[in-house]
Structure formats: C-alpha cells, structure tokens
Amino acid sequence: MSHETMDIPQADILWDVALVPEAITRGKKQPDEIGVYIGTKAARQGLYYTQAARILGFVKPSKPGEPVELTPFGRAFATYSHVEQRTTLRRMLLQREPTRSVVVAIRASEGLRRTEIASVLQDLAPLAQSTAIRRAATVAAWLCATGLARWEKSRLAYCGPTMPVQPSFPHQSAA
C-alpha cells in the first residue's frame, strides 16, 4: 500500500469535480464554498470534491481550514472547453492513481465486478471492505463518465483507447 485513504476518491460525479477549478477561480477558497458552488453539496461533500480535485492534480494539498489553491495545471484546466476537459480527464484517469491501477486490472481481465475493483483499491490504500466497495462505485462512475469503461453483465469493461496505460505520476508536494 502506497497511498492514504484520502487518495481514493469519494466524490461520485466527475463532472462536478471538474467544476472545482472554476469555483476556485471565482473566489471560492474553502471546501464548503466549493460544495455550494458546484451544486448545493453539503460541507462534507465539498471536502470530498476538493480532495478529488487534488487527486487529479487540480489543487495543491492543504491542511484543514487553509484556503484551497489551484496548481498551474488546475488554472489551465479551468480555461479549457468542455471537449478539452473531457480529453484531459480521460488522460488523467489513465495516468493517475487509483484509476490507473483499476484500468490496468480491467484490461488484464474480462472486466471486474465491483468487489474486484474494491480489492484493487485495497491494494493501494488501507480501506475497510465497506469503504472500498463505496469507493469502487466512485472510480467506476469516473471511468464510465469519460467513456473509458462501461458496465457489461455486472462487470466493468474497458472501452477506451488501445494505447498503453502511462505510468502513474507521483503527487506533487505543496510548494
């Protein structure tokens, strides 16, 4: 295990995660403000979506109570068109953990059941089984939202590009 539980996303709607950089450019600097901006999410949900934006490299790591700051990548992403954002999200999901490992496992099999996705996540971070199952649903939703995977006969099957999966990028430390 090389990751913390907070490195496994729990923000179910990827397109709401994609709104986090926009929220920050519009002056929303706290997770609860970001949650409201992206769609009447509760304060806790705002935190989940901010953490997911960090996982994707849009925001810098921060301590509770500190203002959320965009990375240079996050600032650029906020200016992209919807098509550019979709392309970028697909690329990031193929390159960053935990989605990279899930895609590798899906491509090596005939697809994965939700419990098998949960096992991949548990190999990455110390998640309880019930937490891993919930987070597996999030990861699957992200892959489906970008057209990288789809559910076929209760298994998540890869349907993205045939290019090789890129190595994972390490998380950037706070500057």
Image (spheres, rainbow, N blue to C red):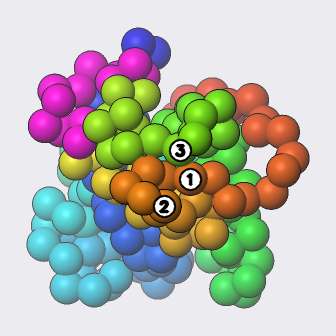
- Report which residue position mark 2 lands on: 152
Q: Amino acid at mark 3?
A: Gly
Q: Position of residue 88 (x, y in %)?
A: 72, 64
Binning the other alpha carbons within 10 Å of mark 3 as few (below 14), some (14 to 19) or many (20 upward) gives many
Work out whether residue 8 can be spotted.
no
Of 116 and 125, the residue lying toward us: 116
Q: Mark 1: which secondary structure?
A: strand
Q: Is residue 114 above or below residue 1?
A: below
Q: Amino acid at mark 1?
A: Ala
N-terminal-most mark, 3 or 1: 3
Q: Is residue 118 above or below residue 33?
A: above
User: Disc 1 versus disc 2: distance between alpha carbons?
Assistant: 6 Å
The residue lying furthest to the right in this view is: 163
- Mark 2–mark 3 contact, CB under 8 Å? yes
Q: Which mark is residue 88?
A: none
In the displayed structure image, the side of residue 77 where residue 84 appears, left or right: right
- Mark 3–mark 1 contact, CB under 8 Å? yes
Binning the other alpha carbons within 10 Å of mark 1 as few (below 14), some (14 to 19) or many (20 upward) gives many
Give the residues drawn in magenta, as a range: 122-133
User: Disc 2 versus disc 3: distance between alpha carbons?
Assistant: 8 Å
- Report which residue position mark 1 lands on: 157
- Report which residue position mark 3 lands on: 111
Residue 23, magenta (yes or no): no
